[in-house]
Structures are given as C-alpha cells and as structure tokens.
Image: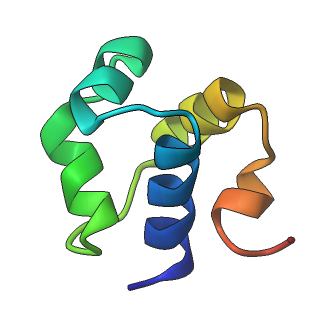
Amino acid sequence: MNIFSERIKELRLENNLTQDALALKTGISQSAIANWENGKKSPSIESIVILAKFFKCSSDYLLGLED
C-alpha cells in the first residue's frame, strides 16, 4: 500500500467516516475512494486538493512528502 492509500484511509477513519460518507461530503465517488485506499488507482490533482481542503491538511502530507 502506498503512502497516499494509508493516509487517506487513516484520515477517513480518524474522522469516523465510511467511504460512502466521505464520498457524499466531498463529491468524490465511493468507488474512487475504495480504489485509492486499495492502491489500485491514483487520484487526480483535483481530487487531492478536495481531500486536502476537506481534511484540513496539505497535499504534501497526503502524498507523503511531509509528516
């Protein structure tokens, strides 16, 4: 599992969100979230920005460029 996969799942669980709930709150499909968490696909730049704003963290954090 890559760092993005780990971090997105960790943030989702810390916020007590299911994949469906995160999808509803961000406008990103549940299947996309599942694919990212499973490491099957990578997110678009737009999706990274949406998630960083939602979780109030930097895109660098999501991508593993900073702790």
Residue closest to the eye, 43 or 36: 36
Residue closest to the eye, 19 or 50: 19
Q: Is residue 32 above or below residue 28?
A: below
Number of numbered discs present?
Answer: 0
Measuring 28% from the left and 46% from the top, which residue is drawn there? 33
The image quarter in which residue 24 lies: top left
The image quarter in which residue 31 lies: top left
Q: Position of residue 50 (x, y in %)?
A: 56, 29
Measuring 21% from the left and 53% from the top, which residue is drawn there? 34
Q: Quadrant of the N terminus?
A: bottom left
Q: Quadrant of the C terminus?
A: bottom right
Judged left or right of residue 16, residue 66 is: right
Q: Is residue 10 above or below residue 66?
A: above
Q: Position of residue 58 (x, y in %)?
A: 80, 47
**Residue farthest to the right?**
66
Q: Position of residue 25 (x, y in %)?
A: 41, 14
**Residue farthest to the left?**
31
**Residue farthest to the bottom?**
1
Q: Is residue 13 above or below residue 51?
A: below
Q: Position of residue 30 (x, y in %)?
A: 19, 35
Measuring 48% from the left and 43% from the top, which residue is drawn there? 12
Judged left or right of residue 34, residue 24 is: right
Judged left or right of residue 35, residue 21 is: right
Q: Is residue 25 above or below residue 66?
A: above
Measuring 47% from the left and 46% from the top, which residue is drawn there? 13
Q: How is colour applied across the structure in the image?
A: rainbow
The image quarter in which residue 20 lies: top left
